[in-house]
Image: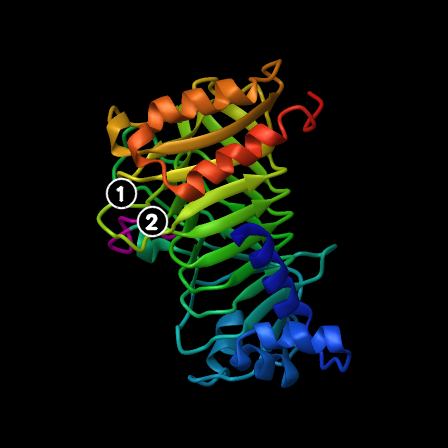
């Protein structure tokens, strides 16, 4: 249920007006009443480096939003590079960052885990509020590319810690730990994510649709590090990649187990020659229930059958730890095996 309903829900949150039709009223009843009210009472503020907007900096625009905000605040950001480190507090929900699709603004900073006392604090933009939306924005961490084995070099471009967030046509640039998909339910559509190692990581429960994931690593590397843990019975976290593309350099595993119940699913995803055919690194603990459901096709040539995919996934994950949701994902991959195809 989650992927399709979450996508529909978030798009409705972005586009909701004040409809009168019965179908619109039924849709509205399914939404959070606070969200419905927020979308009815929108406020638009503008940011422009040339001084022609309400503010010259994004941080000043965010400061103008009151704590306990109850309105959809659309922050229209003009073109250019904004060298700022931003934190959107949990008390300021319903905020949208909007840039022009043909002149996307860049929010850029160069903090690292070393300079800010931890990976979590290194983010160029950190969002802790619910119902955040970003469209046509580039999020960038300009910290230097870390050398092999360098400690405390993690440098996050975006940390999303609020619930029910959506990103449309956004770009995330960095090296190690580019995108911290921290906690909550998130939807990424038509996005571009670039990094070297563990550059999509966190505890989130997220859908990535039609996104390009580009490795710029030199050697062996890992794209995802998902943090679902058996220690929390209510942990439903996991990353789902649907109709995506994996490109770039290095020899990239799709992911590695960051915690003992890490969960990552790739469906109908093109995989370039840089993807390691082994796919998943369980860090030597297959009995811990790590699961990677993979639908492999692309430049490496050929496709694995659905049965082979499931057999390999279950062998690595440990049959005893496959819950109902994971089984259903595997069954969905099985049922579409003969119909899905992406040309190499």
Question: What residue does disc 1 label?
Answer: 152
Q: Residue 270, percent across and down?
A: 62, 28
To which quarter of the image does residue 50 belong? bottom right
Question: What residue does disc 2 label?
Answer: 112
Kindly report the distance in space between the C-alpha atoms of the residues bearing marks 1 and 2.
7 Å
Give the answer, above or below, for where 218 lies relative to 232. Answer: above
Give the answer, above or below, for where 239 lies relative to 25. Answer: above
In this view of the protein, which residue sits in the foreground, 252 or 239? 239
Q: How is the image coloured?
A: rainbow
In this view of the protein, which residue sits in the foreground, 32 or 109? 32
**Left or right: 223 as drawn, with respect to 295:** left
* Range shown magenta: 110-118
Q: Is residue 324 visible?
A: yes
Q: Inspect the magenta stretch and tell me whether residue 184 lies in it.
A: no
Q: Residue 275, percent across and down?
A: 50, 22
Q: Residue 93, percent across and down?
A: 48, 75
Residue that protrudes farthest toward the left in the picture:
231
Verify CB contact (< 8 Å) between mark 1 and mark 2: yes
Residue that protrudes farthest toward the right in the picture:
21
Q: Secondary structure at mark 1?
A: loop
To which quarter of the image does residue 259 belong? top left
Q: Which residue lies at the image location 55% right of the left edge and 51% below the top edge? A: 3
Q: Which residue lies at the image location 43% right of the left edge and 20% below the top edge? A: 311
């Amino acid at each position: 249920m989650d992927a399709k309903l979450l996508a529909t829900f978030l798009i409705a949150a972005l586009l909701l007006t004040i409809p009168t039709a019965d179908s619109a009223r039924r849709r509205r009843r399914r939404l959070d009443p606070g969200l419905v009210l927020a979308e009815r009472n929108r406020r638009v503020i503008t940011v422009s480096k040339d001084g022609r907007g309400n503010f010259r900096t994004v941080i000043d625009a965010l400061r103008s939003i009151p704590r306990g905000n109850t309105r959809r605040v659309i922050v229209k950001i003009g073109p250019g590079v904004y060298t700022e480190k931003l934190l959107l507090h949990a008390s300021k929900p319903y905020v949208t960052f909007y840039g022009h699709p043909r002149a996307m603004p860049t929010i850029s900073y160069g903090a690292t885990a070393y300079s800010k006392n931890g990976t979590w604090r290194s983010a160029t933009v950190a969002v802790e509020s619910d119902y955040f939306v970003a469209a046509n924005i580039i999020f960038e961490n300009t910290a230097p590319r870390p050398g092999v084995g360098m400690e405390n070099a993690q440098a996050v471009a975006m940390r999303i810690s609020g619930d029910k967030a959506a990103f449309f046509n956004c770009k995330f640039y960095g090296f190690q730990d580019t995108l911290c998909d921290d906690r909550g339910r998130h939807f990424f559509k038509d996005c571009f994510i670039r990094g070297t190692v563990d550059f999509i990581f966190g505890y989130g429960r997220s859908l990535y649709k039609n996104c390009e994931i580009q490795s710029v690593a030199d050697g062996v590397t890992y794209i995802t590090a998902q943090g679902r843990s058996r220690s929390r019975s209510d942990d439903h976290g996991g990353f789902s990649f649907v109709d995506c593309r994996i490109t770039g350099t290095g020899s990239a595993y799709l992911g590695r187990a960051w915690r003992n119940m890490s969960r990552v699913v790739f469906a109908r995803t093109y995989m370039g020659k840089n993807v390691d055919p082994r796919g998943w690194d369980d860090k030597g603990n297959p009995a811990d229930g790590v699961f990677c459901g993979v639908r492999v096709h692309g430049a490496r040539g050929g496709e694995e059958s659905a049965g082979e995919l499931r057999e390999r996934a279950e062998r690595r994950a440990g049959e005893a730890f496959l819950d109902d949701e994971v089984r259903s994902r595997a069954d969905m991959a099985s049922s579409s095996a003969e119909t899905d195809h992406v040309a190499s």
